Amino acid sequence: RSSGRLVGPNLENGGAPDSKNLRVKLVLLGDSGVGKSCIVLRFVRGQFDPTSKVTVGASFLSQTIALQDSTTVKFEIWDTAGQERYAALAPLYYRGAAVAVVVYDITSPESFSKAQYWVKELQKHGSPDIVMALVGNKADLHEKREVSVQEGIDYAEKNGMFFIETSAKTADNINQLFEEIAKRLPRSTAQ
Ligand code: GDP
């Protein structure tokens, strides 16, 4: 079945079919300022650098991880960097995405509402079997917390999403986020 999803054998190694090497398109969504770029830079470069912005356009950052069963997953990470405001771009952005990571800031209830808006958009425009993660970022700012862990859990559960709180600043749960996503990818669709 060809649903246009970007999960499949890695054709870069001579085109040899190898279902153990997956490459997936991952899109990031969430309010501006919740830490999307910082999460990606922490994951890909192991750094926290709030001044460095991920470039947009046709380019993306990629990072490969190995799972315990020797599967490798190459994430091709797309960051809207604000372009999500242009609704017309949305379908283009979601197309072929096997994974969507919806981020909010645990100190901002507005960003949590916005995350819920993006989840609805994904349910409308995304692939029906897209793997969705809900991420409460800036977990290091617990003294300023305004969205409880339980609210995140409840919303994620209702919408069939994986939930995790992260801190791009301290690196807490950043690798775990991507590892958990990798584990949830449907292997059977590789072709
Ligand atoms: P984006 O617009 O969603 O891509 O957000 P950025 O990645 O540019 O981050 C926005 C601001 O939030 C930056 O200035 C960072 O300093 C800050 N930030 C990002 N992640 C964290 C985090 O985990 N903890 C804290 N305390 N600040 C963060």
Image (tube, rainbow, N blue to C red):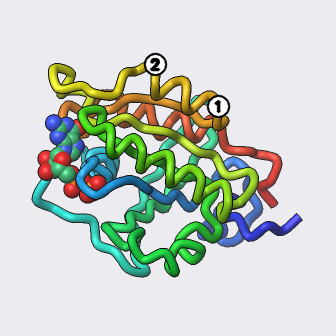
How far across and how far down the image is residue 29, in percent?
43, 56
Q: Secondary structure at mark 2?
A: helix
Q: Is residue 37 visible?
A: no
How far across and how far down the image is residue 190, in percent?
77, 55
**Quadrant into which the N terminus falls:** bottom right
Picture residue at 59% right of the left edge, 52% below the top: 120
Choose top left, top right, bottom left or bottom right for residue 18.
Answer: bottom right
Looking at the rendered structure, the kind of residue marked 1 is Lys
Which of the two residues, 84 or 44, is positioned nearer the viewer here? 84
Q: Tell me if mark 2 has few (under 14), some (14-19) or many (20+) residues whose alpha carbon lies within 10 angstroms of its own.
A: few
Q: Is residue 97 visible?
A: yes
Q: Tell me if mark 1 has few (under 14), some (14-19) or many (20+) residues whose alpha carbon lies within 10 angstroms of its own.
A: few
The residue to which callout 1 is attached is 158
Q: Is residue 92 above or below residue 77?
A: below
Which of the two residues, 36 or 104, is positioned nearer the viewer here? 104
The residue to which callout 2 is attached is 150
Looking at the rendered structure, the kind of residue marked 2 is Gln
Instruction: Please report contact status of discs 2 and 1: CB closer than 8 Å, yes or no.
Output: no
Q: Image check: 160 left or right of 41?
A: right
**Quadrant into which the C terminus falls:** bottom right
